[in-house]
Amino acid sequence: MEQKESIYRKISNWFEDKYKAPEDCMLVMSENNLSTMLKIQPILIGFGFGGLIYILIRYFNYLNTQIPRIIYFAAYVLLGFLSIFWSSKLKKMSFIRSFIKMLPTYFTFLYLMSFPMFIFFFEENTFNAFIVFLCVAVNFPVFFNINPPFYNIIITVEFVFITIKTAQIYHNYEIMDMCILLIVLYILSFRRWGIEKQDFMHSRSEYEYKDKIEKELRLANLVQQSFFKHNETIYDDWAISYYNKPMAGVSGDFLDIYNTGSTLDGIGIFDVSGHGIASGLVTMLVKNIIFQEFNNGRLDKLKSILDRINIRYIKEKGNIENYLTGILSRTKGDSVEFINAGHSMPIFYSAKDDSAYYVEDDNTAFGAIGLPDIPTNFVSHTVQMSRGDELIFFTDGATEATNSQGEDFGKDRLLKSIFRNADRPLTTQVNCIVSDILTFIGNEPRKDDITIIILKKK
């Protein structure tokens, strides 16, 4: 038979759950206290110097009568410097228990609370002693995180001393008000400590959640990159270099290379709408569809292949809202046939003319992949390629990258970057183009994935 938990145990457990802070929480609190200490102590030192100067001016001819007050203000100065030295030393040290880092806080609280007792016993001024006591007792938990048991024991002991004397002077109502004040101080102490603990636990949970999400994103990125990995095949008539970098975690952009041994059959570049894990998962679904339809339709028209991709993706994705734009291309001899599905047109670089320009769009083409209620008209384009010519495909993350002034990198800058680097080795070209984009945006966070692929005729 289970023993019933006592009321005392229930109350004790409640206080422990609500106010007992773990070691890492205590370390954060102590670190904050040390930082606050370094800011507050100069004020207290200034107060001490001010008091000493006042005594020197006001009581210069009979300083011997002011020894207790001189000690009172000098202690602010000396103990203030000691607290600063102690706090700065501990702040530089790591791997120290929270109790040790809390010692300057406890020390400061004790020497500040000793001053009301000094006034009470040596100056025998109960009213001034109570005012100083009140100032320290109210302000200390406001500026510092101090353990309620330690704080409440100290203020209770001093309160008893002051109240005994007050009871001989004032009315019972004043004594009652002081008791209410003591209860308020208890509540203030527990409330401040509880809020600090709650804020820390919330921050830690949020950090742990973010850390978990980041780990999952890294894993998802690893899986996606493994799924999209391309063999470093050297093709007979073509050279390829590409850059594919997600904005964060997994990418909504993807490219694919279709080949038969060392013969290049075609390439594809696509951009799934949205960002994050959802669009990253969609890329893996649609990549498989495109790969299968392209390889199964080698003898079919490219438009028929893309139409089947569109129909199949709409059917297989179900209620997923993500659509995609992109370009699917196929090589044959010296020509490259491609179809643009709502994507940016590629750039053609002519080695013979040493010129670069965007391939002219067909105004009759419209539509993207995966939009069930919107009709499509995919139009085929063919580009004849000579030795040294290049065809550059890219996603809108390259042209829509913005700098701190809100300016887009834009199609003109991309065209100039491609033309300026066209005489470099293929891999260097891609790296230089990406470097131009990243230099343009500077420290501005990226808003989209960036993918660039260059197809060069050997």
Image (cartoon, rainbow, N blue to C red):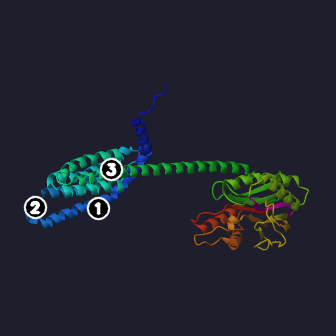
- Tell me the kind of residue under disc 2: Leu
Give coordinates of residue 155: x percent, y percent.
Answer: 28, 49
Instruction: Give the residue number, with chain letter if any, for mark 3.
Output: 183
Q: Residues within 10 Å of mark 1 (few under 14, many from 20)?
A: some
Specify which label sits upstream in the sequence, 1 or 2.
1
Closer to viewer: mark 3 or mark 2: 3
Residue found at the far top of this picture: 1
Specify which label sits upstream in the sequence, 3 or 2.
2
Which residues make up the magenta segment? 322-335
Give coordinates of residue 145: x percent, y percent.
Answer: 37, 51
Instruction: Give the residue number, with chain letter if any, for mark 2.
Output: 63
- Work out whether residue 458 or residue 208 is closer to the camera in this orientation and state it: 208
- Tell me the kind of residue under disc 3: Ile
Q: Residues within 10 Å of mark 2 (few under 14, many from 20)?
A: some
**Left or right of residue 44: residue 348:** right
Judged by its main secondary structure, the magenta piece is strand
Relative vertical location of residue 163 with respect to residue 426 in this rendering, above or below: above
Q: Does 109 lie within the magenta span?
A: no
Residue 98 visible at all = yes
Q: Quadrant of residue 447?
A: bottom right
Instruction: Give the residue number, with chain letter if any, for mark 1.
Output: 43
Q: Does 329 lie within the magenta span?
A: yes
Mark 2 secondary-structure assignment: helix
